[in-house]
C-alpha cells in the first residue's frame, strides 16, 4: 500500500480515475445498469467497479480483457446479518471471480462493545476472501469518535486492507474530518476509502488530500470530467 504522505494529488483525469471504485449498488439496478457501469469504467480506466453479489459474474464478463477490477459488496448495506452469512457471501463472490470485497461492519456489535465478535467476523471474511483485498465499511455517520477509532483498530487487527467510511445508504457520507481521523488511526500504509456523498472533483481531491487512497462513488464520470475542465485560476 502506498504511503499517502508521499503521494501528490492527481493532476490529470487518468490519474484521478485510478483512485475510483465506480459504484452501482442500488437495489433496483438491472443488467443494463451494470453494463453501462462497466462501459464507463473501461472508457475512463477506473480502478474498479463495485457491485452487489448477483452481478459479479456479469461485471467480470463486461470487463473481460480490461484492467478494471470487480469488487463485491458483502453484508450490504446494514451489516447486521450473521457472520456466517457474510462469510458465505464472500465465498460466493470469490467463486464468481470477484477481486475485491467491501464488507459492512456489524455496527450493533461494535456499539455493544463486543469486539471479539466483530474481530472474529472480520477475520472470517478476510480468510474467505482468499488473499483478495478486503475493505471494511464503518458507516462513520452512525459512530462516535471512540467507536470509529476502535473499528479501525479491529479492521487492522483482522488482516483487512482498507477502512471505508460509508455505504451511502444511511444519510451521512465521507467527511474530511473522518478521513483524517481514519488515516491517523490506521497509519500511513493501510488503505482508507472515502465513500458516500462524493459528487464533484473538488470534494474528491479534498478526500485524497486528507489521506484517502481510494474513492467510492457513482458520480465517477462527472468527477473525472470535472478535473478535465477544472479552471487553472481562482473560482
Image: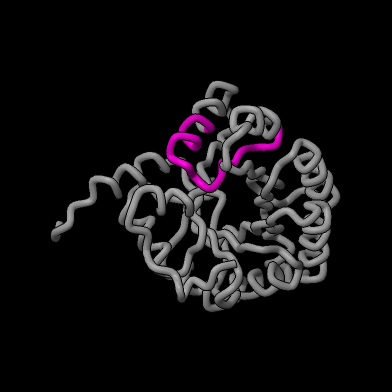
Give the farthest residue toward the top.
32
Q: Quadrant of the C terminus?
A: bottom left
**Residue 22 drawn above or below residue 27:** below
Residue at left 65%, top 37%? Answer: 52
Q: Quadrant of the N terminus?
A: bottom right
Number of disc labels? 0
User: In the rendered structure, which segment of residues is drawn in magenta?
Assistant: 38-54
- x 36%, y 45%: residue: 224
- 66 or 148: nearer the eye? 66
**Which sits in the foreground, 177 or 10?**
10
Q: How far across and down, in percent of the image, does residue 39 sit?
A: 49, 30
Judge left or right: residue 134 versus residue 229.
Answer: right
Residue 55 at what x, y percent from top left? 66, 31
Q: Is residue 46 magenta?
A: yes
Instruction: Report the side of 195 relative to 82 (left or right).
Output: left
Residue visible at 66% across and 48% down in the picture: 78
Amino acid at each position: 500500500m502506498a504511503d499517502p504522505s508521499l503521494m501528490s494529488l492527481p493532476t490529470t483525469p487518468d490519474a484521478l480515475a485510478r483512485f475510483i471504485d465506480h459504484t452501482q449498488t442500488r437495489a433496483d439496478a438491472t443488467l443494463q445498469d451494470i453494463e453501462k457501469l462497466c462501459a464507463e469504467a473501461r472508457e475512463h480506466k477506473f480502478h474498479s467497479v463495485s457491485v452487489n453479489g448477483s452481478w459479479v459474474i456479469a461485471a467480470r464478463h463486461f470487463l473481460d480483457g480490461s484492467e478494471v477490477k470487480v469488487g463485491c459488496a458483502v453484508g450490504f448495506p446494514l451489516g447486521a446479518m450473521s457472520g456466517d452469512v457474510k462469510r458465505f457471501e464472500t465465498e460466493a463472490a470469490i467463486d464468481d471471480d470477484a477481486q475485491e470485497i467491501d464488507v459492512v461492519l456489524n455496527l450493533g456489535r461494535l456499539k455493544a462493545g463486543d469486539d471479539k465478535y466483530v474481530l472474529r467476523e472480520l477475520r472470517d471474511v478476510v480468510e474467505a476472501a482468499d488473499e483478495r483485498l478486503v475493505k471494511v465499511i464503518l458507516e462513520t455517520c452512525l459512530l462516535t469518535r471512540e467507536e470509529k477509532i476502535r473499528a479501525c483498530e479491529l479492521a487492522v487487527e483482522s488482516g483487512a486492507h482498507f477502512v471505508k467510511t460509508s455505504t451511502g445508504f444511511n444519510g451521512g457520507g465521507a467527511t474530511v474530518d473522518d478521513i483524517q481521523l481514519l488515516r491517523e488511526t490506521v497509519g500511513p500504509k493501510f488503505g482508507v476509502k472515502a465513500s458516500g456523498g462524493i459528487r464533484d472533483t473538488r470534494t474528491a481531491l479534498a478526500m485524497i488530500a486528507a489521506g484517502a487512497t481510494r474513492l467510492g462513488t457513482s458520480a465517477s464520470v462527472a468527477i473525472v470530467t470535472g478535473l478535465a475542465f477544472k479552471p487553472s485560476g481562482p473560482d
